[in-house]
Amino acid sequence: MIRMINMPMPKADILVVDDNEMNVRVLEALLLSRGHDVRVARDGEEALKQIGEKHPDLVLLDIMMPKIDGFQVLEEIRSNKETELIPIILLTALSDIDSNVKGIELGADDFITKPFNKSLLMARVRNLLRGKNLLDELESVDAVIAMTAKIIEAKDKYTEGHVERVTEYAVKLGEAAGLEEWDLRNLKRGALLHDLGKIAVPDAVLNKEGKLSEEEWKHILLHPSIGADILQDLKSLKAVVDIVLHHHEKLDGSGYPDKLKGDEITKESRIMAIADIYDALTTTRSYKKSMSPETAIRILQEEAQAGKLDSELVMLFSRLVKDGKFDAISE
């Protein structure tokens, strides 16, 4: 005998879209009994209007409706960047495979054939809401990361905008290099946090005008390790620790802090190294004036020829600069 585990369901704002009054009443009563807030739309136009006014946590969407059918509503939701991630369950009396395939291809997360089994429907609602909550938590983490990056950057008056620029450079290069979506998310987080360790560097060192002493450079060289140590025990950021720790490594082993060589350095860290160096070269610092993009690219290419930077990634980055992909970022 299979033992059913009654897991708690997160409370949610759920939009029921159906023109059949009996279906609406059944669904509304079922969802309200589980503590959810329920809104109702009786055609596709009303559904899109309500979604535009307030994004629901989940949509239960009938396919066969007047004015605009469920497929059209689904397509409209998925084509909008602000609503594309809303979980959607299609409710349909259609049992043919083609309709089910069409719904999935248009972006439905799940579908239930009417007349529906209440336990099955609520189990699927529960699972999608858990996924939605996880996504919301990830977005909250990203907001905290962005805020933390701004706090760190505020310590150094010479690097205003550095974190945002490096993040944009890195993500665009990562996209051009074919990184998967999850790797791009981690790359973005790593870029935002790559200077986290500077929180432990004295302000007098960060803001010193002119050349740093050997002792002062020791403080700077420690910032990747300090940043990685801060992140080490945060489960949600495990994947970005390597980027923070190794964004100053060079392929020939001349980087820091671990003097890694070749394949010991991940693609994400190689990308970060290029983005970080390019921004350092093209902006004014306490110890130097800014260089032109052309001069900065020439230096990156020389570093690649010397075996310090990834030559393929430098070539890709050079092409992006030449094509004006970073013009808006550097303005």
Image (tube, helix red, strand yellow):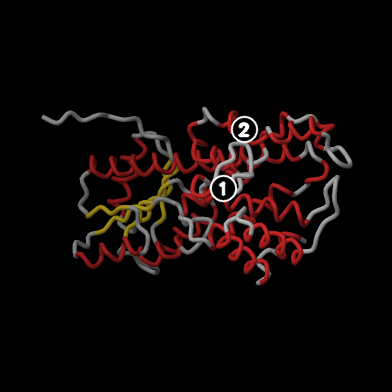
For label 1, count other residues whose C-alpha is less than 10 Å away and answer few (under 14), some (14-19) or many (20+). Answer: many
Of callouts 1 and 2, the N-terminal one: 2
Residue 259 lies left or right of residue 73; in this view the side is right
Tag 1 near tag 2, CB within 8 Å: no
- In the orientation shown, which residue stands out farthest toward the right? 209
Residue 302 lies left or right of residue 75; in this view the side is right
Residue 30 lies left or right of residue 97; in this view the side is right
Coordinates of residue 195 in the picture (x, y in percent): 67, 39
The picture quadrant where one finds residue 27 is top left
Coordinates of residue 56 in the picture (x, y in percent): 47, 48
Vertical arrangement, residue 55 with respect to residue 141, above or below: below
Q: Nearer the viewer, residue 219 or 166?
A: 219
Vertical arrangement, residue 242 with respect to residue 200, above or below: below
Q: Helix or strand or loop: what does disc 1 sit on?
A: helix
Coordinates of residue 131 in the picture (x, y in percent): 40, 42
Task: Give the residue type at disc 1.
Answer: Ser
- In the rendered image, the quadrant that contains the C terminus is bottom right
Q: Nearer the viewer, residue 131 or 56?
A: 131
Task: Give the residue type at disc 2.
Answer: Ser
Instruction: Tell me the residue at 41%/55% (across/down).
Output: 41
Separation of disc 1 and disc 2 at Cα?
A: 14 Å
Q: Helix or strand or loop: what does disc 2 sit on?
A: helix
The picture quadrant where one finds residue 1 is top left
Q: Which numbered dot is residue 269?
A: 1
The picture quadrant where one finds residue 151 is top right
Instruction: Tell me the residue at 70%/35% (across/down).
Output: 221
Residue 70 lies left or right of residue 260; in this view the side is left
Instruction: Tell me the residue at 53%/56% (across/down).
Output: 82
Q: Which residue is mark 2?
A: 225
For label 2, count other residues whose C-alpha is less than 10 Å away and answer few (under 14), some (14-19) or many (20+). Answer: some
Coordinates of residue 72 in the picture (x, y in percent): 39, 67
Q: Nearer the viewer, residue 261 or 105?
A: 261
